[in-house]
Image (cartoon, helix red, strand yellow):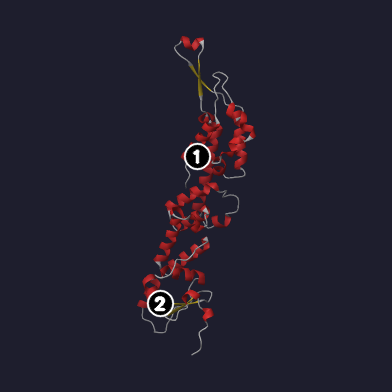
Amino acid sequence: MAARDSSQYHPSYSSRDGDLLLSSSDGVLFNVHSDVLRRASGFFKDMYDMPRSADETPGPLTAKSNTVAAALDIIYPDRGYPTIATVADFQDLQSFGDYYSMPKVGSHIRSLIQAGFRVSPDILGVDPVKLYVLCCRFGLEKEAKLASAQTLRIDVKSGSHDALLEELSCENLLRLTRLHQRRKDAVLNAILLNPRDFFELPKCRVRNSVNMYFGGPENYLHEIPTSWAILTQVIYEAIEKEPLDCVLRDRKFLDHAGLGTLWGTKCDRCVQIVCTKEHFWKSLQDLLDRTPNTV
């Protein structure tokens, strides 16, 4: 008998005790156990349930060797789970599992994605856009929402994530871009149109002879400090370079040289400081927290 060329076999599946020889689309051979395949794959169960000759074997599989090996690692009870690093790897593996009716493969992929939130985000490369794409791909709506919130610190329009975003359906891409735009509009409009919401003292109470005669002090709205325009300019310029949440979740923009007069501006009537740095920061964080942050 001619010696077997071991170089043609996948190193993890080259044992001679297998009774079924599979070939990947790129020509790598896998010597596997038919009883494992029958239990884990509806495709192979149906194949073995049909009448067939003793020496009949399936034709080449539909996937390359790395995908076949990953699927076998998942369904074999005594193997460690494979490392899956890219969106393409996840999708190839899911497609293979679907084609050969391997439910354990799909379940494992979903578990990996969900573990990215619960245990170790490193399992998916700590890339929220990748995570969002995968969640949408596999119908994990709850996890997709969580992933979309994590993308708020990423500039999805920069071009660096275009290859990933192209994997999304038009609907899911639109959901993500609308989230970023709606959040940006809501926060910036609040700062621009409702500055008194960020004042520590939006009103002052001034006593004079007229209003005291009629029973009490008069309420005045504090004037908007002229330096508020500098604040809005600082924020607008910063978010042209970085995502909104990166800018406004970092206190450093509050120390911009042009804002020194804002934090010390006093009301001409009650001589109280209108807006303090600490109160503005707290009000801003409260605004960010209550503004919708998921698709």
Residue 288: image tag: 1
| Foreground of the two, 203 or 294 | 203
Residue drawn 50% across and 75% down? Answer: 11
Image x and y of residue 137, in percent = 47, 58
Considering only vertical position in the picture, is 80 above or below 255? below
Label 1 amino acid? Leu
Image x and y of residue 111, in percent = 42, 59
Q: Are the two marked residues, 1 and 2, in contact with CB atoms closer than 8 angstroms? A: no
Image x and y of residue 216, in percent = 45, 14
Label 2 amino acid? His
Considering only vertical position in the picture, is 117 above or below 67? above
Mark yes or no: residue 236 visible. yes
| Foreground of the two, 201 or 220 | 201
Secondary structure at numbered mark 1 = helix
* Image position of 242 (left or right of 41): right
Label 1 or label 2, whichever comes before in sequence order: 2
Residue drawn 59% across and 29% down? Answer: 262
| Foreground of the two, 203 or 76 | 76
CA–CA distance between discs 1 and 2?
56 Å
Q: Residues within 10 Å of mark 1 (few under 14, many from 20)?
A: some
Mark yes or no: residue 64 visible. no
Residue drawn 56% across and 44% down? Answer: 246
From the image, tell me which residue sits under label 2.
Answer: 33
Going by the picture, which residue comes out furthest to the right?
257
